[in-house]
Image: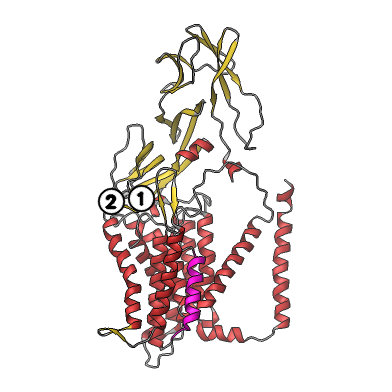
Amino acid sequence: MLDSRYTLLWRTLLLLALLGSVLVLRRLDPETRWLERLRSRFYLGVPWGSILSLGFVLFVYLVVQEGAVRWTEPLAIPFSAWSYFYLAGWLFASFAHVGPGHLLGNLTSAAILAPLAEYVWGHYPGTKDGAWHADPRLRAFVLFPSSVLGLGVFTSLFTWGPVIGFSGVVFAFAGFVLVRYPLLVVVALAARSALRTVAAALDEPIAVVETTASVSPPWWYGIAVQGHALGFLLGVLVGAALLHRRGTRPDPLRLWLGSLLVGLSLSLWVVWWVRGAETFVLYRALGIALVIALATLVTAALAASDRQFVGTLSYRRTAVLLLMLPLVSMCLVAVPLNLTAVDGASPDEAVTVGDYTVFYDEEITNRTFSVVDVEAFGEATDVTASGVIVVSEERTVWSQEVTRAELRTHGEGSVRIGGLTWSERIEAEREGWVVDDDRVYRIWLEHDGERTLAYASEPVVAPGSIDGHEVAVLAGNDGFRIAVDGEDRAHMPDLGESVTVEGIEFVREEAAEDGNENGDERDDGDVLYAVYGDTAIPIAEEERYTSRQADR
């Protein structure tokens, strides 16, 4: 491959460009004031707490989730915050990730924001009473990393649903820095974008992309906006308490503008819901209005007057209480949600590995969202799921891991399950036929070399009739079959062979190469024809699947 042969050359060119630019800047600006400022806030001028915290996140991915041996497929299911009944879930959820993209996205954000938060907090608090917490080494190597760990556990305890990822802590960093240096956070987010661009260029110096059919949900689906808001509010309130203790107040205009831009840049406006197995709703206008309200409250909580407003409450304290209200409300709602048990009911055609049960089903109640029955604004929590489902009553896990749409497009998928000391992989495979605009198909689950027929769809009747006979294709336990006039009459013939039922010859032939209109790389499919007299009528065409590599 021409591109891969020159990958090292392109990476070297990029690194030399960065190094050269830094050297030129060093000659143009030889002052070392920034080093002195770092030494005034960090022990030996290094943000040790941030390094240790991010190192722990990387350790969890590489070792606990086995990302070192399966970089693209870490063990994620057992390390999500499913409920209070599963200790490992809520202890690791804030530090585990579902894949390399998720991990690197949070690490690049944390690499920018965590040192800024540590800078605001500082290793030299300036106390003169010899307080134990004033030791810079203790603050750098113990107190800051411990605070990050505690914050991560707190966000996983009070999030709604099986959240996973470091983003709640990252948002807390953003909120904490925002109250002290509002516009610096905006600059930091731009730096984050630049860092991600450079990292992507080093990882893939040349990108070749082909147009393919996509089965991905919208980019905002799965964003844990409640967990993000929880972390952000907590960071703002802790930062506000620190500034109050230090007797510092921010500029109102800068704080409002910074809060608004940060809220929009960090997608705090993404308020979404799921309407069914493959339908999602984004309330964009509502989300932006909430971000504007949040920016106003943050500004008032730190910059409002101390004059009396209501009773003994000042304007500023009233704003602080209003800012605490959504935080407390989210925590109160999270408690009953995380105390619910999992319904372990599953069909007989399931694969059991350890305490996990894996099966395929369609249009069943989605237990991730349907914890309690609520209807509001035209939406409801009673939604459905279709695909490969993973259930573990012991771990309170209920998760749709491979969607019906993904199997329909790729023809395959996989699930990794396990725990702290073990992991297993289960493969899902689909095979089927397209009859007119409908499909008849079977889903297989394979584990440790053993295949289980997990699902067979309903028969599909071909349109029209042939010599007065109705023809249908059905999925049976022993393969696909042909039904005539509602009766199962014959096996689907092999390629190049035929079978005759009621004077109608059914012939299976290789599909003509018609140049897939989407340009997708698909497996070759066959066509089933019904031959009667001199007429050959296409009845069904074998499903063809886009390769996963092509879809990427």
- Is residue 400 part of the magenta span, yes or no? no
Q: Is residue 360 above or below residue 180?
A: above
Magenta: main secondary structure equals helix
Question: Mark 2 falls on what kind of element?
Answer: loop
Mark 2 sits on what residue?
Answer: 372
Residue for point 37% across, 85% down: 132
* Label 1: which secondary element: strand
The spot of residue 176 in percent (x, y) is: 44, 75
Residue at 37% from the left image edge and 64% from the top image edge? 155
Q: CA distance from mark 1 to mark 2?
A: 13 Å
Q: Mark 1 Cα within 10 Å, few/some/many (few <14, many 20+)?
A: few
Q: Answer yes or no: is residue 543 visible.
A: yes
Spot occupied by residue 359 in the image (x, y as percentages of width and height): 38, 37
- Which of discs 1 and 2 lies nearer the camera? The answer is 1
248 or 2, nearer to the observer: 248
Q: Quadrant of residue 296?
A: bottom left
Q: Earlier in the sequence, mark 1 or mark 2?
A: 2
**Quarter-of-image position of residue 518:** top right
The kind of residue on which mark 2 rests is Val
Checking the image for residue 379, the label placed there is 1
The reply to whether residue 338 is visible in this rendering is no
500 in relation to 26, above or below = above
Part of the protein shown in magenta? 249-266
Mark 1 is on which residue type? Glu
